[in-house]
Image: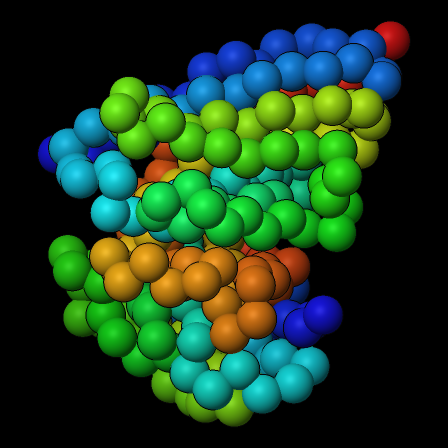
Amino acid sequence: DIQMTQSPSTLSASVGDRVSITCRASQSISRYLAWYQQKPGKAPKVLIYKASSLQSGVPSRFSGSGSGTEFTLTISSLQPDDFATYYCQQYNDYHTFGQGTKLEIK
Amino acid sequence: EVQLLESGGGLVQPGGSLRLSCGASGFTFSAYVMTWVRQAPGKGLEWVSTIRASGDNTYYADSVKGRFTISRDNSRNTMFLQMNSLRAEDTAVYHCAKDGTDTDYIWGTYWDHWGQGTLVTVSS
């Protein structure tokens, strides 16, 4: 089974900051990785798929990069609406999520 | 507009059974791989099961294999999850999700639409 490890688990930042979240796979997953944003009591929302493709309707301040075993989600300039929990998901071999990164207001 | 609506959750005793449904609208249901994902209270997301567009192929997480059965009725635009031998650790909100591509790729890809979920509580 492929394990996905996200870091950090919690991230404190301010509006306007540039932040990055990392996701590491236990073996190569090529570029079969998606990123989701989830707010309390809501369903997850896809931001990025195929490692770096921006989902339609998602603001361009979100970007993804990486391949193989290491991936990054970057938010170029944090907005108030961005404080949420973020998950990576691999779909190279069935599906596995990272444990999540909670992005908090500093 | 794509809509996914789960139903069938509730309180069940350990060892009991429950059948979840996911009604879909706003897209050609029969063309898409569909998936169940769950989230235990205060925990992260966990993939549960996936079914290909035709329903001929199904995939399960090890944690539910042999206890849960996924199925679909393309004539009714509905997906199901039959859950047997339920355990306390199955307590979660269960979301249905639509695949992000229409390529009917084996176990599916990412998910571009999700339902709001239905809560399953396993407790005596």
Of residue B75 and residue B124, the one placed in the foreground of this image is B75
Residue B97 vertical placement versus A14 (above, below): above
Q: Position of residue A63 (x, y in %)?
A: 30, 76
Q: Position of residue A84 (x, y in %)?
A: 45, 50
Of residue A21 and residue B97, the one placed in the foreground of this image is B97
Q: In the rendered picture of this protein, how many numbered marks are placed on residues?
A: 0
Q: Is residue B95 visible?
A: no
**Among the 4 quarters of the image, the one containing residue B43:** top right
Classify residue B16 as left or right of residue A82. right
Q: Position of residue B48 (x, y in %)?
A: 61, 44
Classify residue B101 as left or right of residue A18. left
**Which image quarter is the C terminus of chain B in?**
top right
Residue A103 vertical placement versus B2 (above, below): below
Classify residue A16 as left or right of residue A91. left
Q: Is residue A97 visible?
A: yes
**Among the 4 quarters of the image, the one containing residue A102:** bottom right
Residue B87 vertical placement versus B54 (above, below): above
**Which image quarter is the N terminus of chain B in?**
top left
